[in-house]
Structures are given as C-alpha cells and as structure tokens.
Image (cartoon, rainbow, N blue to C red):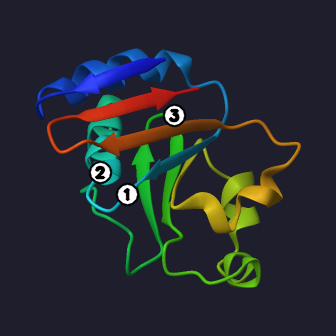
Amino acid sequence: MQFTIKSIDDWQGIVDRIVPELKHNILLLKGNLGAGKTTFTQFLMKKLNSTDEVNSPTYSIVNEYSTPQGKVFHFDLYRLKNIDEVYDIGIEEYLDNAFLCIIEWPEVYEEELHGLKFHEMSIINTGEHREISFD
C-alpha cells in the first residue's frame, strides 16, 4: 500500500486503512528523524481506543500503552548499538506478550526477525509531503 501525507489531517485516513491490514503483532517503522513515526503511532493508538498519552520512546527505549485488544509496546532502538543491547531490554518477552509491538529504528534488530511475520512501514519526508509505504 502506498500513501501520500500532505497535512496532519491525512494521518487519520492512513491509519483507518492500515488497521484492518494488521495481521501480525510486529510493526517496523522506518524513516528519518522527524519523518512522522511517532505521529503515526499517536493516530494508531487513538484508533485502537487507547487513552494513554503517546510520546516518542527515544529516552525510555520502550513505552507501554493499553488498548481493549491488549498491550502495545512502542520501541525506539535508535540509541542501541548492537543486538546484545536489544536483548538486554528483554525485547523477546515484549514480543511474546503484546497485542502489537511497534519498533522504530528496527535495523539493529531486523536480522533477528528472520522467520517471524511482521509488517513494515516506511515514511519518507520529501520536504513537501511524506511518502508512506506499508506491507
């Protein structure tokens, strides 16, 4: 699926289209700094009926949100230097016990996902708008 975001209001329509497509409990979010990964997550959590405040987990590494469907864990792996640091935060336990795990900056962990089913979303900020791809 491909989308273009021209204004903040466009995010809701994207989320409305993506939520029915979420078949796996892992969603990788890729994009440069400021692309809109956390903004997407804010709209997604609202759509999933979470009343929790959604912030970037840049410093906490992982944020937890409650939804009627179950726990959602929102990771930011940007500051992690290697796979050992990813395992040190207990990522496997989160993956095993979540309705959904949203992983920003997943590159340090991506190789470990071999054999698992997951979704991937890319957000590219072109300067004028954002180009989204979801699979």
N-terminal-most mark, 2 or 3 = 2
Q: Quadrant of residue 132?
A: top left
On the image, the x and y values in percent for residue 73 come to 51, 56
Q: How many numbered markers are drawn?
A: 3
Mark 1 surroundings within 10 Å by alpha-carbon count, few (fewer than 14), some (14 through 19), many (20 or more): few
What residue do we see at 54% from left, 70% from top? 77
Position of 117 with respect to 134 (left or right) is: right
Which label is found at residue 35?
A: 2
Q: Which mark is residue 32?
A: 1
Mark 3 residue crowding within 10 angstroms, few (<14) / some (14–19) / many (20+)? few
Query: In the figure, 93 relative to 96: above or below?
Result: below
* Mark 1 vs 2: CB contact within 8 A: yes
Nearest the eye: 50 or 135: 135
Q: Secondary structure at mark 2?
A: loop
Depth check: give the residue in front, 24 or 53.
Answer: 24
Callout 2 amino acid: Ala
Residue 114 tag number:
none
Q: Which mark is residue 69?
A: 3
Q: Quadrant of the C terminus?
A: top right
Q: Badge 2, how many Cα within 10 Å: few under 14, some, many 20+? A: many
